[in-house]
């Protein structure tokens, strides 16, 4: 009897532990879902059968269905006009890798015909992640919390006779280890990186001539054409050091970079860094040292760019032109003006035009138009609501809506 009671207690204990574990897991899943907005859809994919059915045909048909699902998800985020005007960027940067935004999918039906294979796929797309990338690629406009950065960094390993670079005289196509590592870190931190990557910009089509590789005046012109806010310019090199660690050789990488503001044409800061790595192989040693220095440089760049952007753009006092219109306009305008004057960051509200059904005001605000618009949307009013649209760098429109 005693032994049975012990076994019974052990079973109860096990049951409570399991129940607690399942509760923890389910709670964790709920918390994940709260921060992850999901778009669910079912799409079809078709692939021609030319010489017999194969797994590759099914794979291609499923890919088509996944791409179609992400297209539908993008349509949930963008207006038809935004979708059309950004078609090239969407096709090149978003739709080429649809699986990046997909939480999971399942094949729900298949149809094999003589000349084609059709598959129906149920897909769940992570809208939160999709929006993040649309902002990163600057497809979603008007929410520029981070600057766009142009990287002009020449690179030379021990195997190279001369430094490699994709701009200026004697430029050549190549994959920069340093720039790729910097880009990876900056994209993860939601910066926009322009000009570089696998498809380098043809700077010659803009009529820009670099008199030498570190020609800052030409770099500024290129930055303006590519709508960059900050330019990072400099050089990186790697080589075998004299020191050794047992049988392994030590490889050193150095980088010297300047950070410029495209708006002011002034240098923001400069820095130099050094990194070492060990390896038995000369080529791999140089490569790993350059990757390591790229990671270190990315941290310096993001810190410096964030500091500059925060102090000189996001918190800079500027005049924001605001058009105000809508129902019961005059009475609502008086309440809105009081709210604006009481808002932190607002220095003044000056009426430039005043009509019977609309007004144009200039708001001196310490921050961006986007920040002011977001702050206004948090305000509540007794007799009306507001719609804010057409948000640009230094302007937006407010429309009153009666409750």
Image (cartoon, rainbow, N blue to C red):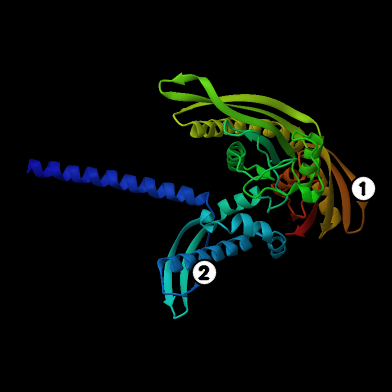
Residue occupying the point 67% across, 56% down: 89
Looking at marks 2 and 1 on the same chain, the residue that comes earlier in the sequence is marked by 2
**Whole-Å distance between the Cαs marked 2 and 1?**
52 Å
- Quadrant containing the C terminus is bottom right
Q: Nearer the viewer, residue 82 or 390?
A: 82
Residue 66 in the image: above or below residue 134: below
Residue 35: x and y in percent read 53, 49
- Res 195 quadrant in image: top right
Residue that numbered label 1 is attached to: 352
Q: Residue furthest bottom?
A: 114
Secondary element at tag 1: strand
Looking at the image, residue 209 sits to the left or right of residue 99; the answer is: right
Residue 188 placement (x, y as % from top left): 58, 42
Q: What is the x, y in percent for residue 137? A: 65, 50
Q: Is residue 122 above or below residue 179?
A: below
Residue in the image at 42% along x and 70% along y: 108
> Pointer 2 and pointer 1: residues touching (CB < 8 Å)?
no
| Residue 43: numbered disc | 2
Estimate how packed mark 2 is, as few (under 14), some (14 to 19) or many (20 or more) residues with alpha carbons within 10 Å: many
Quadrant that contains the N terminus: top left
Badge 1: few (under 14), some or many (20 or more) residues near its Cα, within 10 Å? few
Residue most toward the front?
161
**Depth order, front residue of 43/341:** 43
Instruction: Look at the image and tell me whether residue 288 can be seen.
Output: yes
Q: Seen in the image, is 243 located left or right of residue 7?
A: right
Q: Is residue 378 left or right of residue 353?
A: left
Name the front one of labels 2 and 1: 2
Q: Secondary structure at mark 2?
A: strand
């Amino acid at each position: 009897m005693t032994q049975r009671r012990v076994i019974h207690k052990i079973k109860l204990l096990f049951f409570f532990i399991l129940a607690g574990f399942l509760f923890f897991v389910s709670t964790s899943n709920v918390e994940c879902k709260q921060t992850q907005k999901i778009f669910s859809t079912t799409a079809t994919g078709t692939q021609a059968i030319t010489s017999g059915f194969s797994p590759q045909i099914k794979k291609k048909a499923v890919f088509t269905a996944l791409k179609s699902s992400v297209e539908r998800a993008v349509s949930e985020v963008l207006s038809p006009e935004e979708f059309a005007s950004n078609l090239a960027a969407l096709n090149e940067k978003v739709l080429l890798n649809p699986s990046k935004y997909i939480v999971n999918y399942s094949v729900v039906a298949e149809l094999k015909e003589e000349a084609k294979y059709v598959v129906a796929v149920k897909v769940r797309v992570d809208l939160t992640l999709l929006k993040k990338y649309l902002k990163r690629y600057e497809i979603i406009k008007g929410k520029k919390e981070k600057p766009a950065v142009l990287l002009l960094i020449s690179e030379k390993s021990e195997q190279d006779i001369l430094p490699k670079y994709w701009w200026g005289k004697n430029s050549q196509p190549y994959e920069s280890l340093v720039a790729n590592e910097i880009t990876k870190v900056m994209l993860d931190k939601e910066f926009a990186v322009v000009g570089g990557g696998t498809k380098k910009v043809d700077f010659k089509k803009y009529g820009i001539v670099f008199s030498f590789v570190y020609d800052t005046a030409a770099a500024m012109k290129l930055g303006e054409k590519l709508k960059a806010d900050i330019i990072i310019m400099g050089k990186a090199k790697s080589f075998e050091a004299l020191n050794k660690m047992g049988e392994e050789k030590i490889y050193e990488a150095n980088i010297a970079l300047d950070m410029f503001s495209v708006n002011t044409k002034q240098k923001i800061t400069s820095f130099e860094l050094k990194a070492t790595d060990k390896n038995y192989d000369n080529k791999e040693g140089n490569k790993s040292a350059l990757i390591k220095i790229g990671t270190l440089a990315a941290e310096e760049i993001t810190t410096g760019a964030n500091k500059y952007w925060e102090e000189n753009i996001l918190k800079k006092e500027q005049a924001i032109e605001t058009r105000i219109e809508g129902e019961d306009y005059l009475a609502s305008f008086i309440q809105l003006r009081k709210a604006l004057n009481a808002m932190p960051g607002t220095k003044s509200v000056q009426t430039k035009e005043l009509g019977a059904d609309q007004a144009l005001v200039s708001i001196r605000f310490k921050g961006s138009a986007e920040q002011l618009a977001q702050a206004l949307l948090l305000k509540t009013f007794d007799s009306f609501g507001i719609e804010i649209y057409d948000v640009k760098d230094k302007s937006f429109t407010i429309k009153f809506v009666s409750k």
